[in-house]
Every structure is written in C-alpha cells, then in structure tokens.
Amino acid sequence: MNDNLRLAALLFPDCEKTAEQYLTEVYPPRALPEGAMVTRFAPSPTGFLHIGGVFTSLVDERCAHQSGGVCYLRIEDTDKKREQEDGVTGIVQGLADFGIAFDEGATGPDSEKGAYGPYTQSRRVAIYHAFCRDLVEKGFAYPCFCTEQELSDIRAAQETQKVLPGYHGEYARCRVLTLEQVEQNIKAGLPYVVRLRSPGKPGARVKFKDVIRGDIEMDDNITDIVLLKQDGVPTYHFAHAVDDTLMRTTHVIRGEEWVPSTNIHLQLFYVMGLKAPKFVHVSPVMKEEGGSKRKLSKRKDPEASVSYFVEEGYPKEAVVEYLLTLLNSNFEDWRKQNKTASCFDFPFSLKKMSQSGCLFDLVKLQSVSASVISLMTAEQVRSGATAWAERFDPELHTALARDEDYARGIFAIDRGGSKPRKDITKWSDVRGYVSYFYDDLSERQRAWPDNVSAEDRRAILSAYLGVMNTADDKDTWFAKIRDLCAPLGFSPDVKVYKAEPEAFKGHVGDVSAVIRSALTGRLNTPDLHSIMALLGQERCTQRLRECL
C-alpha cells in the first residue's frame, strides 16, 4: 500500500462506499430524453429569499420543463454559522408563493421528494468524505494543520512580497508533510482541514463556454482550496461539484458573481475525473437610482425580499409574468399575440437573456399585475383576494367570506370584454376597491362633482329617491335618471349641453355623478347600474336618505 492509500485510510477510516459506487450504483444516470436539461436551484438558508432567487429559479424551471427534463431544489446549508432559523421553510414557502414547481428536492426542513437525495448538503457528509478519500488516494488532496495565526502570517508575507494571496506553492506549508508527520499530528489531536493539491500552473489559462456570455478565459487556479473544513463539512466549491455530478445536473444556472470561481470548479471536476456541466451565469436584477444602476439591496430595497410581494398581494402569476419580461425581451411581443395563453407556454430561451443585468421596475410590475388580474374570472379574483386577506387583512377577509356569491358579484362587474377594467393591481388594493359594498368597510369620505351645488345635489337625490328601483333593467334605469334632468335644470343630452352650456346647470352625466357619489362615495366606479343591483333597494334607499 503506497503512502497516498495509507493517508486516505488514516483520514477516512469509516467510508462505507467508494466514490465509484456512488457514481454507478447509488446515483445512476437519469433516464431522460435526448436534450433534456437537469437544473437545480441551490440556495443557502442564511437569510430571506431574494427576488433574484425567484428570478434564477424561474430560469431553472423553464429550462428543465421546456426540454422535458428535471428541476430540483437543493439546500446548501454547509455554512452553519450564518444559517437562520426557519431559513429552509422561508425558501420553500417563498418559492411556492410564486408557483415555482420543482420535480425533486427539499419540501421542508425535514422533508423531501426524489430519488437523488438527500437534497440537503448537511445530510450528505458521508458522500463528500468518499469523494475526498478518492482524491487523497490519487494524490490530489492532503490534510492541513495550519492555525489561524499561521495563515495570517502567510497572508502578511504575501502582502509584503506583493504576490498572489492564498495557500499555494511555497506558502502551502502542509503540502510537504510526510505520512509520519501527519500521523503524529493526528495522534496529538491537532485540528485540520483537507485541501486540494491544485495541479494549476502559474500563468496558465483556463477557457470555458458560458451559455449566455460565450467564451470566457481566466487564470488557472493555483490555490490549494479547502475541501473539508475542520468539522468534516465540505466547502461550497467541493460540495457543489460532487452534488451536481451525482444528481446528474446538466446546466448549472447561477448568478454572475460565481464567474471568477469557475476555474476552481472546473479544476475540481478535472481532478475527480468527472465531466463538468454547462455553466449559465445569470446577470443580477438591478435598480435605477440617481441615473445609474445598482443591484437590488437587501438592506435598502423592500422589494428585494419575496415577502414584500406576498404581503403586498401581487398574484404569483403576475410576478412570474413580469420576470419573464425581464428574462427575454421578446416576451411582451409574444404576449400581445397570445393574450390569454399561460405565460408558461412562452418559448423561453437562454440565448435571449441579457448579459448586462435587467432593471426591476415596480411601476411596470404594477401594470403587468393589473393586466393579469383584469383577465381573471370573478371567482379567481374573489379566491385570490380572500386567501391574501386571510393572512394580511382579517377585517377584509371577514367581509369577503361572509357571502361568497355577493363577493363574486362585486368582482364580476365590468369583468370581461375587449377592454376590461384594471382597477386592481394587487390584492392589497381590494379593500379600497370593495369598501363601499360593505357597511363595515365603508369609507366616510365622499367626493362630489365640483360644478353641482349642495342645493342641486339635494334636489337630485330627493327626486331620484322617488323613482329608484334597483330591479330595473339598464335602459329603464338610465331613462329615469335622464327624465330627472330637465325639471332640475340639467340637460338630458350631453351634446346639447356642450352646444349651449350656459343654458343648463349641467348635464345627465353630472346628475349620474351625484347619485354615484351618494351611493358609493366616489366619482369613478365600475358600472353604476350593476353596483345598485348588487347593493339592493333597501341599502341604496338607506344611503340616499343618509346623504339627504
């Protein structure tokens, strides 16, 4: 047995399976059609889910499902110091809130689905040890006993000598330890990490093809990076290379901040004798500020967190629809030609993604969301608004849930047709939209038309109270309002009024506006006839009398 084999046995005496067994027996190749993509979204539970995470996960989901492949959710929780309580729950719930569907992966802090798990890295330590043992046997990894002080001294020396910082070359002190020295250190109980013995050469270059950015070239990695930390848990670099191989990932889709680390990752695949996946580096979601662009900030921008969109009540369909406009510039043209199609029918393309970052615009999101809601059925709006209100507006929820048919009737007014109304941009707008339909939500403020005096308002309401019948059909209803006009000094015909405005106090639209305001408190509402039919004779009568 040579020294590398003896060292591997010393460092990893408890490995039950070899790397080869994991590759061939435990995680066999997936049975998928030619061209099918296997993608993963792999967040760390170290903070709230960023909208950029939803952005990237949507790319994962679209690529996999459009190609007949698999998209899975992997939790990369190797950084236990920064992990937040309920971090996994927040990630899973946040993605579910936006309808991002995973075929496999974590479904909660202690649950998952799929045959290529565990999908949480902290539960895969034995697997990483098997692959690390294999690297030690091949001479590509070794234990490092350097203390924090020794590493600090190395950095200081490198700064003084103005050389590339890092644990490499002559600065990699533990590279040259003999087997006997390693045995002595371990017997003495000295803590250690396991490092890569980098085969990189100073001055050498690495080239790879990014699916979005094309050919990229950078310096080869010469640093002996840490593979396993002192507690035996792997670093991100090593864990991702092992996991993406075993889970048969074909495309690693991640943020552009990982571009500088790709030389390390390619080197890891090389020393392990594994085929690297294709890399897809996605540009960040940006925000315009002071004439320039910057990344959405977790500290500065509330919209950076997905919880913002949930709390505001943006339907998941609207957020996904908007993100697709950022992902592919041709989405909006497609939408104009396919107005009622699901956004998931859009032929998404990686090649049409921007290399420079996309600008997140809340105003544009609100416009997209209003369009999405305007195309929903009354039941879909009622259901979505009620579900949101149950979490964030109990008083509204009580009102909407009291009589589902009544609530459905509210949202049915002016819904449909070639030019549907777009009064609701998000579920948090619903309280304001429906408040006048409910006495317990009613706003006490009222807007009157400026050109109608208080005396004329009283005259209009008194006269209308005598003829109002909420059961009238629309023609009869409007005819009664028109008949009120002349005796009260208003023109029943708008054109006649415009031709001779000085001859009248106003026109039939002004009379209607007074009635509208008396019944709803507003000058702008959906169809007044439909509103009155839904409110009913008794409630309309009561409101007119209150105004008088």
Image (cartoon, helix red, strand yellow):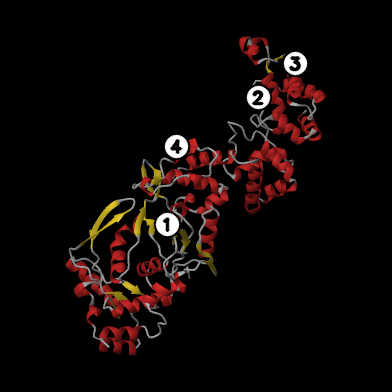
* Residue corresponding to mark 3: 488
Q: Residue 449 got which mark?
A: 2
SS for callout 3? helix
What's under tag 2, amino acid-wise? Pro
Query: Mark 3 or mark 1, which is nearer the start of the sequence?
Result: 1
What's under tag 1, amino acid-wise? Ala
Residue at (45%, 63%) from the top-left corner? 31
- For marks 2 and 1, give the CA distance: 62 Å
- Indicate which label's residue lies in the foreground, 1 or 3: 1
- Indicate which label's residue lies in the foreground, 2 or 1: 1
- Percent x, y of residue 192: 33, 80
- Indicate which label's residue lies in the foreground, 3 or 4: 4
- Percent x, y of residue 80: 44, 71
Side of 194 relative to 392 (left or right): left
* Residue corresponding to mark 4: 333
Q: Residue 36 got which mark?
A: 1
